[in-house]
Image (cartoon, grey):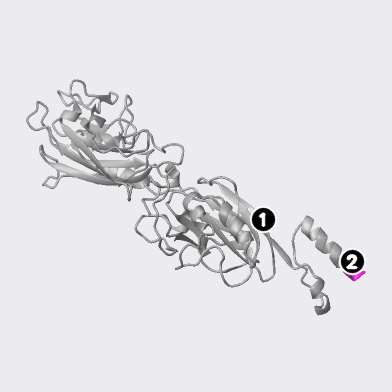
Amino acid sequence: MKKTFLKTTAFAAGIITTFALSSCSDSDSNMMDMSIQRTITFENVVSPKDFVESGSFQGTGNPPIIMPGQSVSIKFSAGKAQALMFATMYGASKDWFFASKQPGIKLFDGNGNAITGDVSSEVLLWDNGSKDDITGQAESKPIMQVPNVTASQLMKLNLSYNDVTSEFTLTITNTSGGTANQTPFSPGVWAVSNYNGSQLLNTTPFFTPNALSNPEITDIAQGGDITKMKMKLEANTGIMTGLSPALVVVYRGDKNPVYELGKMDNGMGLKEIAQFGNVTKLQNSLKALPNVKAVYIAGNAPVSPGNKVMTSFKADQGDKIAYATMFGFSNDWFYANEQSLDASVKGDLTSKTTLFDSGTGIDQYPGAGNHQALFGGTPQVESNAISKVGTLFPVPAVQNVIKVTVN
């Protein structure tokens, strides 16, 4: 009778809820269902910022203006959907400034090839509408292009590109000397808008044409003062990312079957997660291992900021779990538990989660690398051992990107 009761209870627990029968005599322990059932959740907690990179530039003199004949260079990273916006004052004016058309200088052609060489045609000259061009008296008009002045005759723009790093260099040269519009350029600002996989987060950086100006661009246009704009850009610049569906494995033993820190990728499918967020190969490979009891997948699509995925898993006493999910806006990074985890664990596991480099693809600036899957690219091959991601790029702390909990 007692055996029948125990079997019935175990069957019901498998259908309705999950618990372990813990009060029993030693003689009955071999008949107990000691299974554990948990739900693990992966949440993307990134706070998206408008810009992935931003900065400023200035001349080398005192004051640091860019005089006719002088040049200044900007280095930045970008993928094929992104553009570079910059702004600098036309110094010999009341409130004019140079900037490109929205959303910025085009960096890639329709085939995804980087645009290099002379791109001076991308620069325009704008009237901020905040001062009368003759008297300097305050006015309130929308930002409009300055008529009858060709900006590309006053400013030369030249682009070069490093395909390995996906890094551009823009050289700005003041070519206004000897023209009817000779002018110095003020210090300036630049930015590259974040891209979320389908669109730019900011398609009108700095200002909106045919609308009234803002305090930040007004300070540049009227006095070449970039202080306010720099502060605004810094507050709105940061790396963001999506996460891939997460793989969760239940296993026995001391060796994490997903990865080994300091060892090369073993070809079982971790590379496919780290580079493209594809869990299928590793899922199938793990299922074939004798020490693996089950493999679960949380989610079936990229996990954007503010969203989460989850999966339930079943294990036995003594089992362990491991998990992995792609840092989506990278070439080959993944989040995984660094420490060994007992399958009975509960609570917040974020502190036990680390960002790793799979060593299979050359790194580029996160969210601005043309060989990243985000831009439809394929990482360039490298063969390094799996390591923790370092500080080369200003990647947000783990707890500011992903939250992992088990209930």
The residue positioned farthest toward the bottom in the image shown: 26
Q: Residue furthest right?
A: 1
> Helix or strand or loop: what does disc 1 sit on?
strand
Placement of 247 over or under 27, stated as above or below: above
- Which residue is the site of mark 1? 312
* Magenta region: 1-5
Q: Hey, what amino acid is under mark 2?
A: Thr
Q: Where is residue 68 in the image (x, y as percent from the top left)?
A: 10, 37
Q: Which amino acid type corresponds to the residue marked 1 in the rendered image?
A: Ser
Does the magenta-highlighted stretch encompass residue 311? no
The residue at 10%/31% (across/down) is 182
Tell me how many marks there are: 2
- Residue 378: x and y in percent read 43, 47
Residue 374, percent across and down?
Answer: 44, 44
* Residue at x 67%, y 71% (from the top left corner): 318
Residue holding disc 2 = 4
Of the 4 image quadrants, the one containing the N terminus is bottom right
Q: How crowded is mark 2: few (under 14 residues within 10 Å), some or many (20 or more)?
A: few
Observer-nearest of 383 and 311: 383
Residue shown at the point (14%, 36%) measured from the top left: 174
Residue 94 appears in the picture as rendered: no
Q: Residue furthest top?
A: 148
Name the residue at 46% across, 41% down. Answer: 197
Q: In this view, does 81 lie to the left or right of 71?
A: right
